[in-house]
Amino acid sequence: MQKIVLVYIGVLLSMSGYTQQGEQFIRKDTTQLDEVILIGQRKLSNHRQEKTLSSIDDYLEKSNKITMLKRGNYAWEATLNNMTSERLNVTIDGMQIFGACTDKMDPVTSYVDVSNLEKVTVNSGQQGAENGHSIGGAIDMKRPSSKFYDKGLTTHIDMGYETNGNYGTTGLDLEYSGDKFYLNTDGIFRRSDNYKAGNQTEVFHSQFQKYNLSLQGGYKLSDRHILETNIIYDKATDIGYPALPMDVSLAEALISSITYRYKGHHSLLQSWESKIYFNTITHIMDDSQRDDVAIRMDMPGWSDTYGIYSKAALHKGKHKLLINLSSFYNRSIAEMTMYPNDPNQPDMFMYTWPDIRTFYSGVYVKEAYAINAFETVSGALRFGYHNNTIAKQTGLESLQIFYPNITDSKNRMLMSLSADYKLSEDSYDASFALGYGERAPSVSEGYGFFLFNSFDNYDYIGNPNLKKEKSLEFHVNSNFHFDKLKIGLESSCFYISDYIIGDIDTTINSMTIGADGVRVYKAIDYATILDVYLDADYTFNKRFSINSSVGYNYGTGNDNIKLPLIRPFSYLAEFNYNSLGFNAALQLEGNANQSQYSSFYGEDKTPAYGILNLNLGNMFYVKTNKVVLKYGVENILDANYSTYADWNNIARQGRNFYMNVSFVIR
Amino acid sequence: MLYSVISKSYWVYTHGIIQSYLKFKQMKLKYIFPILLVILLITACSTDNDDTPELNEVEGLLKIQELTNDSHTIELYTASGKFYTGYNAVSIRIKEHSSDTYVSNASLVWKPMMQMPSMQHSCPKSVIEKASGKKTVFTGFVIYQMTNLDGSGWTLTIDYSINGEDYSISEAITVEQSEKKNVTSFMGTDDKRYVVALIEPTQPIIGVNDIIVGVYKMENMMSFPVVEGYTLHSDPRMPGMGNHSSPNNTNLTYNHEEATYHGELSLTMTGYWVLNLKLANAKEEVLKGEDVTEEHTQSSLYLELQF
């Protein structure tokens, strides 16, 4: 079976199997299992228990391969295999969606909430090509599956409070589940003041406030045919970004889709799913909350995506075939208005994303062949056509300052190929995968116009003539099961040619006041990225277990230049106790000294850190209603620390007491 | 807010998906509009404007002033309907009083004159020529290097001849101060006085603009010949935003055909730009202007641009 890291988000609000299967606590799974089986079985391990009302970001962060880049306390950017958004394909139920902020202050994960999702699948490298092209891999956030359980009305109420930042969460979920029809609506509201780093140091401009509403409904046309609709509306206001010179006054998204599903029965065609979707994002960056700025500015951005996909799963004998046809159209536009301190001068205006239209259409085919009960080989191919068009004449003319010969349109053909072999015996399992993938530059990389990057203090200029980035990758993963001990080794290695990164151009004068200069995106010959994780789990008995993990990452480019944002040596250890109505976990996690930092790209040496967390959980029934209580202390020792993934070394949260309580009323 | 998102989305949806259809529609409009326009014009002409069919020879221009003598009225037009300091492209028509028609063949020479307390002087100007493709319109340009606060001080004299007969008209004109500095006069290190005026861009874009500048030497109070073969080094800056520059500007070099200096000017955003210049002669000796540095934020030779 294919190598997949499944991050299981057991979201209380939307978990259909939660009560049915008598699972007591909300956990997720970082073990590697077959994707299809997991959806049905919902068999959760003890790994890294979480508070039920964590943000998506918190959940993602618990995955080995994912690190969240933090620019504040909200809207963290997921990185996978040490690669950031432009090298990843982040989707919601297979739907393409793109942030509207030129400074990556709104990764798409910030527009959904745990209440919207059932799980997140994370696929490394070309294993994640099902929904689109990427280099580092794919993160697909899955909405709950259809719920024709005929259970009537269920109500979930969730409340959470955290002392650090005076952070409150309230959620309400109403679910009606019939035989032919179901409707699920949920709403969640979050609000936090400035958080405090270790030693009670207040981190100014770290507040946020957001609410999220979603609606999911399905109707059974017949036994095998289902029609579903999904709407998510997410609105965040007054979001502070302490690591950046600007904040966000509004981040708003409307995400909608209509899906038609067909479910086969012992037939060749197992399932067939078609979806048409639309999403729109408005993102308003401003600096009105900042006292001391060189010049006032507004930087709003918009991103709209329309798409369609149709995928079919076929099964015959030892063969499994998956075909996915998809297409999307995105419009990204962002602008900047600067208000001169001299009132006699007019406002200064420019397009930072000059109305870039991206059209993609492609096909994905994956074939898996079971050699025998233990061995499987599979191969996958994605092939697509990618076009970027500059829709605004002004935008084309702006970019022609740098590239006099460009036209408004650029076509690229993209390809992804992968093959893997999996072996699964009782005492061990292993998988090997090879892949080749390509990607087109992101809107910022291709067309960004004086985008200030506060990390390295340079203005960035896009390059419409960039070559495709190409990656050759190798993954290995193996697990050995001894009596009570399980040891796992997982490694990914990428050799990326025409690696896109900003290069200093001394001939260009920076625009941003105080910037050190201008970098223009260009492709360096190659870059190498490697990550290795070693896991060990030991189960003492039914109640006690220990799991631990250490990781090593490495990334360099041409001439041995260190790549930025490569995770230093990391470790994690967790002691778990579980009983029917109670669980507890003590976690130790940390990073070693960041010795391989990239000063060229604005990094400095981040010192080692280690923090201790304690999570506790109870579950009990009041009549037929269930109550789940999660509470604990994070960063018990109140360490003042920052990690390599903290933008401009912004300090992370200090000690935090939290409590989440959820009621399931039926 | 939700509503606005939906309505915006709808708009974008229409715009995106049915774009090709819209294009088709626009194509149709492209044909329909001219037809409508023609119909309108025909209707308009047939009802009340039969007698002046040449009216549209100055279409899009506004009349500044009429200069009148016994036999003729000279009409002066510019795009703005006013004279401003700096470069003015002027269109001229002569109306004969006796026949009430516009003269199509004439030769004109103009003499703008500024009356100062102690002396008077003229300014750089072109010859006046028949506008190409027009029957009754003559064109030329004039560069007023200064004016009084109230716009007074300038007198325009036009000597002209029609069918071998000479006439002259002279009248005071009003020249208003341009909002931005688009002309400058100075003494070069060669002890000669120069006038430098911005001609293009009149409608700057974010992007690469063709910049045209006129450079004239003040030989005496009356004569301002074109300076040939010099170079203008240009460095556009935005003082409102850290005095940043823009990339890929070219120096302005002399264009013989048009007798002006041409180059490329990159403007990365809208707003107020200072065009720092250095004027160098054929031997590359700088006659006026300095490099812009952290300490010296503006050249002593500069023009302004705002859009």
Image (spheres, coloured by chain):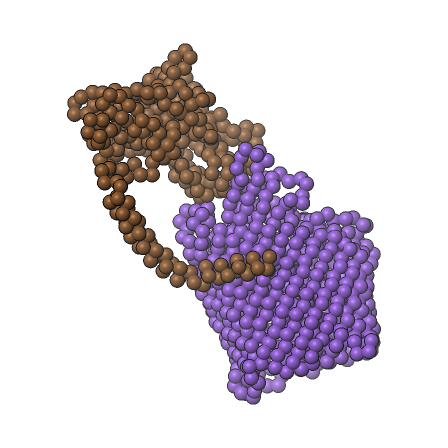
Chain colours: A purple, B brown
Q: Work out which residue is located at the far front of the displayed protein and give it.
A: B47
Closer to the camera in the image, A133 or B268: B268
Picture residue at 70% right of the left edge, 61% below the top: A189
Residue A183 location, quadrant: bottom right
Lateral position of residue A612 relative to residue B176, left or right: right
Quadrant containing the N terminus of chain B is bottom right
Q: Work out which residue is located at the far top of the displayed protein and give it.
A: B118
Task: Give the answer, above or below, for where A431 lies relative to A660.
Answer: below
Q: Position of residue B11 (x, y in %)?
A: 49, 59
Closer to the camera in the image, A642 or A331: A331
Lateral position of residue A596 relative to residue B15, left or right: right
Task: Give the answer, above or below, for where B196 lies relative to A589.
Answer: above
Picture residue at 40% right of the left edge, 61% below the top: B20
Picture residue at 26% right of the left edge, 23% below the top: B109
Closer to the camera in the image, A390 or A46: A390
Residue B27 in view, yes or no: yes
Q: Position of residue A304 (x, y in %)?
A: 53, 60
Task: Give the answer, above or below, for where B276 lies relative to A198.
Answer: above
Picture residue at 31% right of the left edge, 52% below the top: B36
How many marks do you count on the picture?
A: 0
Q: Position of residue A565 (x, y in %)?
A: 64, 55
Q: Work out which residue is located at the far left of the displayed protein and give it.
A: B163
Residue A567 in view, yes or no: no
Q: Position of residue A92 (x, y in %)?
A: 59, 67
Task: Give the answer, above or below, for where A518 lies relative to A34.
Answer: above
